[in-house]
Image: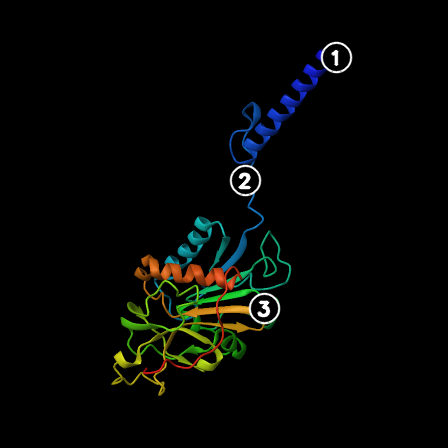
Amino acid sequence: MRLLRNTFSLSLAVVGLAMVLSSVGSQGQPGPMGTPPVPHAKPTHLKHVLVISQTKGFEHDSISAAMVAIYNMGKESGLWDTELRTDTKLLTKKDLQANAKNLNYFDLIVFASTTGELDLDDSQKQDFLSFVHDDGKGFVGIHAALDTNYKWPEYGEMIGGWFDEHPWTTFNAPIINEDPDFPAVRHFPKAFVKYDEIYQPKSWSRDKVNVLLSLDPSKLDYNNPRVHRQDHDFAVAWSKMYGKGRVFYSTLGHTEESWQDPDIRKMYFEAIRWALGMTEGSTASHAKPAGH
C-alpha cells in the first residue's frame, strides 16, 4: 500500500514538473529538454490601434516621431499594439487578403498629421464613419489631421472642423487649460506656454466640442492678415462625440521636438486611453472662459 502511495506521489511530482517546464517554455524561455521556446502570443487583452500618416499635401517632419511615440506608448504601457501605415488600405470593413487587418480588428484610428484628400473610395469613407459613429470606436487626430479631407463634409463633422491657416506659424503659444479634469490635459497647469504651430479652425464651433486647451486671446497679436476668426477663439485641443464614438483632436505636435516633450507625449497617451474607453472625461461644450 505504501509502495502504491509513493508511486502515486512520484507521478504527481512528474506531472507537476512537466507543467512547470511547459509554463516556462510558454513564456519565451527554453522549454524542456532544450527545445526551442514557444513563440510569445500577443496578450488577448490588448487593444489595437491603427495609425495612418498618408500625406497628399504638406509633409511634416514630425510624422515619424509621432508614429514611433504612439507605438512605444502602447508597447511600454502594455495597453495596445500599433499598426503603422502610410497608406489607407486598412480603412475598410471588407475582407482583405494576405493577413491584412481591416477595421473590424481595430479599436482606434489615429491620423498622424495626414494632409489633403486621402485615398479613400466611397465604401471606405462609409466604413470609416461607421467605425466611429456606429461601432463606438475611437479617433484621435494629431495636428494636420485637421488639414485633411476638405471635400468630405462628414469628416469635418466627425473631427470638428478644418484647418484655416496658422496665423502665428510656430511660436511660443500662450495656452489656457479650460478643462483640468479631463485626463489628457489634467497634467497641464492652468496657464502655460508651448513652442508649437497652432492651427486656426474653420467650420468649427465651440458649442459642438468640449474645448480642453485654447490660446489666451489677451496675449495674441491680431495685427495679422491671417487671423480670420473675429471671435478670437482659437482652440488648441478638444474632445467630442461622433455618434457612439469618442473623438480627440489637438493642434500640438507640429515639431519633431514636441514629441520629446513629456507633456505632449502624456497628452496623447491619455487621449488614446480616453478614446479607447479606458478613462472618463467630458465632451460637453462650455462657454468661453470669462475675461478672455
Q: Is residue 43 above or below residue 193?
A: above
Q: Identify the amino acid type marked 2.
A: His
Which residue is found at the position 55% from the left and 38% from the top? 39
Question: Mark 1: few, some, or many residues within 10 Å (few <14, many ≥20)?
Answer: few
Q: How are the residues colored?
A: rainbow
Q: Which residue is mark 1?
A: 1
Instruction: Give the secondary structure at mark 2.
Output: loop
Q: Which residue is mark 3?
A: 124
Q: Which residue is mark 2?
A: 40
Q: Identify the amino acid type marked 3.
A: Gln
Instruction: Give the secondary structure at mark 3.
Output: helix
Which residue is found at the position 44% from the left and 80% from the top? 206
Residue 234, position in %: x, y? 36, 78
Number of numbered discs visible in the structure rendering: 3
First along the sequence among labels 1 and 3: 1
User: Do the residues under discs 2 and 1 have CB atoms within 8 angstroms?
Assistant: no
First along the sequence among labels 3 and 2: 2
First along the sequence among labels 2 and 1: 1
Can residue 158 be seen by looking at this rendering?
Answer: yes
Residue closer to the observer: 253 or 178: 178
